[in-house]
Image (cartoon, rainbow, N blue to C red):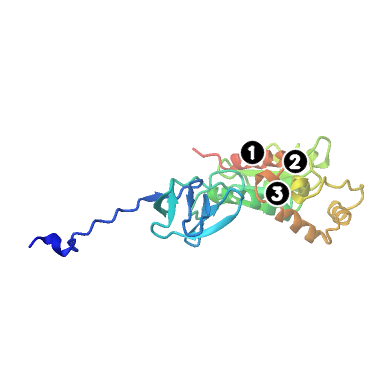
Amino acid sequence: MRSHDYGRDVLNTPKRKKVPEVAAEPGLVVEDPASGFCGAVVKFEYGQVVLEDRHGRHRLFPLNPAGFLLDGKPVTLVKPAPGPQKPRISASGSVKVEGLRAQTAKASRIWVEGKHDAELVERVWGHDLRVEGIVVEPLNGVDELPQRISEFGTAPHRRLGVLVDHLVAHSKEQQIVDRITDQNVLVTGHPYVDIWQAVKPQAVRIKAWPVIPRGTDWKTGVCEQLGWGETWEGWQRVLNSVSSYRDIESDLLGAVERLIDFVTVPQD
């Protein structure tokens, strides 16, 4: 008896066609056949893919096998293979050293006038300074700078970089700096009355720093005019507005960068 009399051979079933896997690169346009939603891949969230349609609407879909249509044909979307990671950038704009362990502090130092100066330098250049093993210390004023330098005891391997506020021609600060002739000391500065002014006004969301009359404490006057409360509250507002070097005026950027270069120069 012929086999076709019994119908088709149930053991001879056709093989299912394998559904291709497609990397869900951003911008790839696919359709969810169940809902008819058609959109471009935007990102992944919680193990699912986010699609955006032409109206800007976002929807979340699971990455099910054969879960989407590409050019009318079923596909399985998969996450793209990770490409080479771009180097992360520190707040100062330098390439960030991953897994950093701060070096043992070197003998060289950077001195700044006060606590606020030190905190702002740390906010922007902290990563770089830890890479180099350089400590920043507040001076609490520059009136006794020549004496402090003498007590420190500089040497080619023990350099000092000093950042001075309001370093302008004919100022008291400039007269003090002019007395320093030690080749192992570099003094740089900025023209602002206070380090607060070295933060760009737009970063703090003001049009400009207020002009404070002579005889009035500058920080106190600023906080009164801007309604910032006590000076410590004003400083927290200023410091928290700084996320990178882009929020800092170029005068301060250049001054600090020169100091870091000076105290980290390789010794023979």
Which numbered circle lies on residue 190?
A: 2
Q: Secondary structure at mark 3?
A: strand
Sort mark 2 into few (<14), some (14-19) or many (20+) by Cα contacts within 10 Å: many
Residue 170 in percent (x, y) is at 84, 36
**Residue assigned mark 1:** 258
Sort mark 1 into few (<14), some (14-19) or many (20+) by Cα contacts within 10 Å: some
Residue 238, by quadrant, is bottom right
Residue in the image at 70% along x and 49% along y? 112
Residue 189 in percent (x, y) is at 73, 41
Q: How many marks?
A: 3
Q: Is residue 81 visible in this depiction of the protein?
A: no
Residue in the image at 88% along x and 46% along y? 211
Q: Nearer the viewer, residue 170 or 10?
A: 10
Q: Residue furthest top?
A: 169
Residue 192, by quadrant, is top right
What amino acid does circle 1 point to? Arg
Residue in the image at 49% along x and 45% along y? 86
Q: Nearer the viewer, residue 167 or 225?
A: 225
In primary-sequence order, the first of circles 3 and 2 is: 3
Q: Is residue 86 left or right of residue 159?
A: left
Q: Is residue 33 visible in this depiction of the protein?
A: yes
In primary-sequence order, the first of circles 3 and 1 is: 3
In primary-sequence order, the first of circles 1 and 2 is: 2
**Marks 3 and 2, how far apart at CA:** 12 Å
Q: Residue furthest left?
A: 1
Q: Secondary structure at mark 2?
A: loop
- Quadrant of the drawing holding the N terminus: bottom left
Residue in the image at 83% along x and 46% along y? 209
**Marks 1 and 2, how far apart at CA:** 12 Å
**Residue assigned mark 3:** 112
Where 119 falls versus 245 (above or below)? below
